[in-house]
Amino acid sequence: MNKKRGFTLAEAMIVLVLLGVIAAVTTPIIFNSKPDENKLKFKKAYYTLQRTTDAVLNSDTYPEGDLSKTTNAADAFCMAFSDMLNTTYDDCANSSAANTNGTSAFTYNPSSATSSLDTLDGYCTKTSISDPFDDSTNLPKFITQDGIFWWGFDYDFASPTNSSGIRTDYTIICVDVDGSEDEQPFAFGIRNDGKVIIGNRGREWLREGSDSAIAD
């Protein structure tokens, strides 16, 4: 008659210890390899902004390829932009919407690009945005279905400036990838001919290995 043999207590303990060691080694690797959600949403917003700006500029609304060639240019651009996206909240003309630079263009100085781009970021980081679904004030212009808050769009694409023949005037668009949570917003500049620049903080995030700990 065959005799059945099970694991001894010592053998079972050894197996549990080995499993614990394997878990301790592999768990950090698994979590570190998980994509940063805010980073992914930022990249999505960046490419969405470029693609949508180009689409708006080439739409029937702007037959001359100039974002200033319409009445109430800032609101018109915001509405044309948001209409091309899937939004959960949309009110570009809301008087409670946050503005970043009044009606003046941000001036990009090519001779001091780093400090100018930091200033571009500063227009957005100084603005505290509220959630419109909490009956708040200081609201974003619109919210896309992925939870990203968008505001700015408050320059009417007038009075172009230049430095050594280079156009330096931009309106500012602010993008907050986690809504009204802790992550700081990102700043983009858009000229009336559709040229887009990105703030210093956003440029850092586009580099390989960037994460949400990057400071302004």
Image (cartoon, helix red, strand yellow):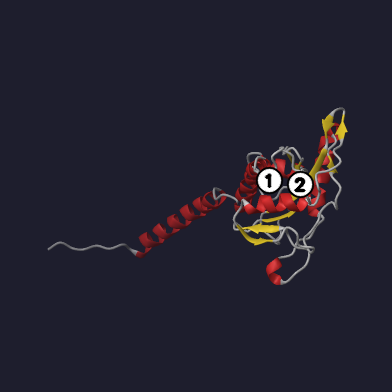
Q: Amino acid at mark 2?
A: Thr
| Residue 22, x across and y down, in percent | 46, 52
Q: Quadrant of residue 108?
A: top right
For disc 1, the neighbor class at 10 Å (few under 14, some 14 to 19, many from 20) is some
Q: Is residue 133 above or below residue 45?
A: below
Q: Quadrant of residue 158?
A: top right
Looking at the image, residue 129 lies above or below residue 70: below
Residue 101 % position (x, y): 84, 51
Q: Tell me where residue 211 appears, x and y as whole percent.
A: 66, 47
Q: Is residue 135 above or below residue 82?
A: below
Q: Amino acid at mark 1?
A: Thr
Q: Earlier in the sequence, mark 1 or mark 2?
A: 1
Q: Nearer the viewer, residue 62 or 193?
A: 62
Q: Which mark is residue 37?
A: none
- Kindly tell me whether residue 74 is visible in this rendering: yes
Between 46 and 95, the residue placed more toward the observer is 95
Viewer-side residue, 94 vs 9: 94
Q: Return the mark for residue 61.
A: 1
Q: Which residue is mark 2?
A: 70
Secondary structure of the residue carrying numbered label 1: loop
Quick one: label 2, few (<14), some, or many (20+) residues within 10 Å? some
Q: Secondary structure at mark 2?
A: loop
Q: Nearer the viewer, residue 22 or 38?
A: 38
Quarter where residue 183 is shown: bottom right
Find residue 143 and report its horizontal and vertical position in percent.
66, 58
Q: Are marks 1 and 2 in contact (CB under 8 Å)?
A: yes
Quadrant the N terminus occupies: bottom left
Distance from the alpha carbon under mark 1 to that under mark 2: 8 Å
Residue at 60% across, 58% down: 145
Is residue 216 something one can see in this rendering? no
